[in-house]
Image (cartoon, rainbow, N blue to C red):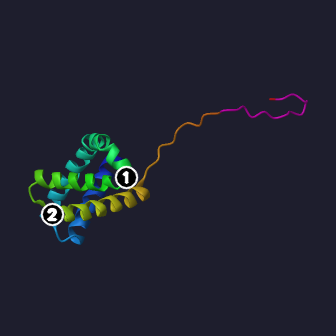
Amino acid sequence: MVLIITRWLIITMAIIAASMLVPGIKVDSLLTAILAAALLGLINVFIKPVLIILTLPLSILTLGVFTFFINALLLALVAYFVKGFEVQSFLAAFLGSLIISVVTWLANYFVNIKTEKPKRQDFIDLEKGDDGKWR
């Protein structure tokens, strides 16, 4: 649960950073950024994989660059649904999605909480005892 909230706050800060750096993106308040981050997270979980699969031939042809256009489209979709979050042009959405992706990637790199998995032993480590028997 803490990991989900942390990532949500990271995306919120990335949206605020994008609104400060890109002139075509406007966020009215912190609450608007929080709602936009929540909706962007949900869209990235449910809609983005479907779009990636549907546009797979185009993504292969462009060596994955088309994924940036999908991210821009999804950011514009979030702006359509969240009142107070505006993206004025596709170029602003494209630059904003790049900034959000980079900030999110960097922050998740430093915040990543790894869960410990039990080690699977593929071998048994034997030692030779004083009496010459292996244990």
Q: Which mark is residue 96?
A: none
Q: Quadrant of the C terminus?
A: top right
Where's residue 86, x and y in %? Answer: 12, 61
The secondary structure type at the circle numbered 2 is loop
The amino acid pointed to by label 1 is Gly
Q: Residue at x 18, y 58 (%)?
A: 33
Start-end of magenta stretch: 122-134
Q: In the rendered image, which residue does mark 2 sit on? A: 89
Q: Which of the 4 image quadrants contains residue 47?
A: top left
The secondary structure type at the circle numbered 1 is loop
Q: In the rendered image, which residue does mark 1 sit on? A: 64
Q: Is residue 135 above or below residue 97?
A: above
Q: Is residue 34 above or below residue 24?
A: above
Q: Is residue 73 above or below residue 54?
A: below
Q: Is residue 113 at least partly visible in the picture?
A: yes
Q: Toward the viewer: 105 or 8?
A: 105
Farthest residue to the left: give it: 83
Where's residue 54, x and y in %? Answer: 28, 40
Q: Toward the viewer: 121 or 74?
A: 74
Q: Is residue 1 at least partly visible in the picture?
A: no
Q: Specify whether residue 11 is painted magenta.
A: no
Q: Mark 1: few, some, or many residues within 10 Å (few <14, many ≥20)? A: some
